[in-house]
Amino acid sequence: MNIADQIALVTGSNRGIGRQFVLELLERGASRVYATARRPESLDFDDSRVVPLRLDLLDHESVVAAAAAARDVTLLVNNAGIATGAPLVTGELAEVRREMDTHFWGTLDVIREFTPVLAANGGGAIVNVLSALSWFAGPGTGSYAAAKAAEWNMTNGVRLELAAQGTLVQGVLLGAADTDITADYDGPKIDPRDVPRRSLDGLAAGSIEVIVDDWTAMVKASLAGDPAPFYTRITEMLGVR
């Protein structure tokens, strides 16, 4: 996919990786970018090609309305997400459910509503921003990791289902990026601008999976082996006893 002249919609555009996706799409010549957020008044892009829209992953009617308003979309970027920090066993079950409702059900809802839009416009592409935590869990990340694991395999399933209509479905996986959601994390963080750059380069090459950083590459490589040494290494790195 050549980004020039594409019409994109990005969820969670008001900050972090979503905002960087909008800026990178504009820089690469996208003709229009629908920038969405739960509160569109929080969007502050100074470019006439940006169209602000309300979209809340937990509000189905807002998803339907966004799909009706953006009938010309050829590239859908599912970036919006949350991190409650809720433990799976002792945390509030409502918060655990909110993670799954956002990352799995909410993202799937957006895909289902935009699938006919993409089909009508020649197929296009879907980008799902995932996480290295799709493949492992660390201390304090149980709910988030479970939801991202579900979103990762949902991405694989959707890819198969939409192949016949010519829609490329890409999963983008990364460790920690320097955004608000990782403000309390003291470990290494990548520049959030690296995520859309690698993703869009991958679209140009037809890549269905993009590994953004070395940390995520290490996690993926560990999956073929015994998980015990991997989790020993993780706990030692994080100082967990």
Image (spheres, rainbow, N blue to C red):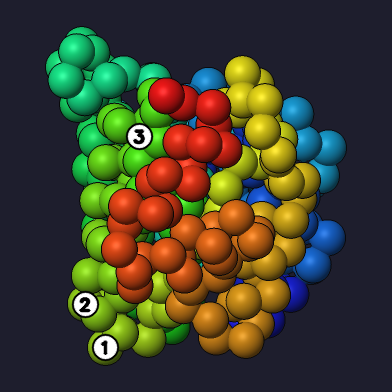
Q: Residue at x 21, y 77 (%)?
A: 161
Question: Alpha-carbon neighbours of circle 1 within 10 Å: few (<14), some, or many (≥20)?
Answer: few
**Residue tagged 3:** 144
| Pointer 2 or 3: first along the chain | 3
**Residue 167, percent from left and from top:** 39, 79
Residue type for callout 1: Ala
Q: Which of 142 and 163 lies nearest the eye of the viewer?
A: 142
* Mark 2–mark 3 distance (CA, rounded to whole Å): 25 Å
Q: Residue at x 77, y 46 (%)?
A: 191
Under circle 2, the secondary element is helix
Question: Alpha-carbon neighbours of circle 2 within 10 Å: few (<14), some, or many (≥20)?
Answer: few
Residue type for callout 3: Tyr
**Residue tagged 2:** 161
Under circle 3, the secondary element is helix
| Pointer 3 or 1: first along the chain | 3
**Residue 43, percent from left and from top:** 67, 28
Give the position of the N terminus as an image quadrant: bottom right
